[in-house]
Image (tube, coloured by chain):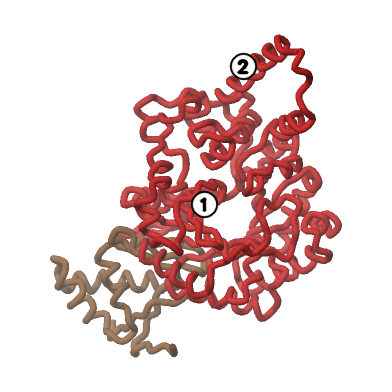
Amino acid sequence: MSTVYIARVKEVAARSIGGEMMIMSARDSTLFSLNETATAIWQAADGVTPLAEIVQHGVCAQFDVDPATALRDAEELVERLAQHGILKLSDHPIVEAK
Amino acid sequence: MSALIQEMSDKAQRLGIPLAVQLDLTYRCNERCVHCYLDHNDHGEMTTAEIKELLEQMAEAGVFFLTLSGGEIMMRRDFFEIVEHARRLSFCVKLKTNAVMIHRSEADRIQELALDAVQISVYSHRDEVHDAITKLPGSLKRTIAAVRLLVERGVKVIFANVLMRENFADYPGVQALAAEVGAEFTIDPTITPMMDGDRSIMDLNIERAQLQQVFRDASILGTSPEEFCVPPGGPPAAEDAQKMLPCSASHTFCYVSPYGDVYPCVQFPLPTGNVRASRFLDIWKHSPQMLEVRSITLSDLPVCSSCSHGGGSCTRCPGLAYMEGNMRGPSSQDCEKSFVRTGVETAGMLIRREARSIDGLVQIRNSTAGPRSPQAAKRESLTPWWSAPVFLNQSECQSWAGTEPEEGGGCSPATREASA
């Protein structure tokens, strides 16, 4: 996979409940619960930091996980979140108008 | 209820997080519904700044599900400013409205806000019936026009059909109308007392036979009537009763009035504090009244803990019990509902019957005192039964606290999902 940038979609509701991120998609009212690792990726999804960098600094640095495995799992995760419309993926930085 | 939502609710309860709040923005309204329990005069609503500050405190406290209601929410000129602020704070927002002030531009803005749902009151599919209840001529036409605008824009709309004697026969028509316009449909078969305790509006409640009809209508139960009306399984074991909580009020849910008063629930008018005087989280965590409500388990209810319905067929609302005079007592409305549902009398009904029989004997012995006043007789006639506002397809009381449609998605190690 080429460089991937990820950004949180504005059209969701989200709240951290005891360290676990709850996300409700407005598109289909699907509720997601992200574990600690996925929450770290979600929170770092600013649209301008490459996913690989997020995994390296936000996941591998905090959690005892093999970098290659972590990146593969993260790519799978962000693809899935994008399919549900709660994360945007791009091969270019995502800068949204305020 | 989806397993994930139940899990989230359990976790919030364990951690003392107010997962869901209903905030009424105003009690003012452009309709004058015959069954409404509110005083529509403005007695000092919170300002825009006060509400924004409250929303920030709620987000910090962990509130996720936020219902904005009234009164008619769009009577506030700052309505969109408030909702936009709520969405910036990532609340999952549901609106309750009569929708008559929603036109194209408002529908566009609501669509942009990516809300969870808009719940709209519809009393009949016939203008003359609906408008007679709202006392606003043309209201049904305006409401349905707004519904169509919202649905066209992909906004989830839920019809809330409150049932009264005068519109009971129309609920299949409202159900069909909901299907036609692409809205979900819920019914509320009960009318509750005014906030000031006045029970005169309870005359509007549907009759027992009508409630029986509702409880045996598979099209609105979401399950088979046989399953829904199964006889009670007996009182729970004592050790289970110590763990069973009456409902989510003060555990994961609370209500805030337009004046900043915080209550355990919309229907539980026990003042616990005011956000103009204290921080929201301080009231939630430390108010003696909130803590008292939170401390009550089924085993603390002297009548209900021994009731055969306590194991599952009871939908006792502690707020309605409180309005009857004892938050640890039975709610006669819910007793009646359990009876109609299963054909088995509740412990509360048996005790009341016994009390009436003793009262009768006392009257015979004191016959020189003369008959009871017409007012007393009227009060008694108004309370044969009344019950909590249960939306049969999506419990209003429990929707945020747990009762939701079935789980829709699969699981992965990193994410779990559920259709809510």
Residue farthest to the front? B368
**Residue B221, image quadrant:** top right
Where is residue B63 drawn, in percent x and y? 41, 61
Where is residue B344 drawn, in percent x and y? 61, 23
Q: Residue at x 50, y 37 (%)?
A: B327
Query: Is residue B393 rendered to the left or right of residue B40?
Result: left
What amino acid is at disc 1?
A: Ser
**Residue A17, image quadrant:** bottom left
Residue farthest to the right? B128
Where is residue B32 drawn, in percent x and y? 75, 58
Closest to the observer: B359 or B253? B359
Chain identifier of the residue bearing label 2 in the image: B
As helix, strand or loop, the secondary structure at mark 2 comes to: helix
Inspect this view and state whether residue B261 appears.
yes
Q: Quadrant of the C terminus of chain A?
A: bottom left
Separation of marks 1 and 2 at Cα, in angstroms: 36 Å
Count of labels shown?
2
Where is residue B253 drawn, in percent x and y? 45, 52
**Residue B390, image quadrant:** top right
Q: Quadrant of the N terminus of chain A?
A: bottom left
Chain identifier of the residue bearing label 1 in the image: B
B85 versus A64 height, above or below: below
A26 versus B224 height, above or below: below
What amino acid is at disc 2?
A: Glu
The residue that mark 2 highlights is B354
Q: Which residue is drawn at 42% across and 51% down?
A: B252
Pick whichever of labels 1 and 2 is earlier in the sequence: 2
Q: Spot the red chain and give its letter.
A: B
Q: Spot the brown chain and give its letter.
A: A
Inspect this view and state whether residue B420 appears.
no
The residue that mark 1 highlights is B399
Using a 10 Å C-alpha cutoff, classify the residue at mark 2 as few (fewer than 14 neighbours), some (14 to 19) or many (20 or more): few
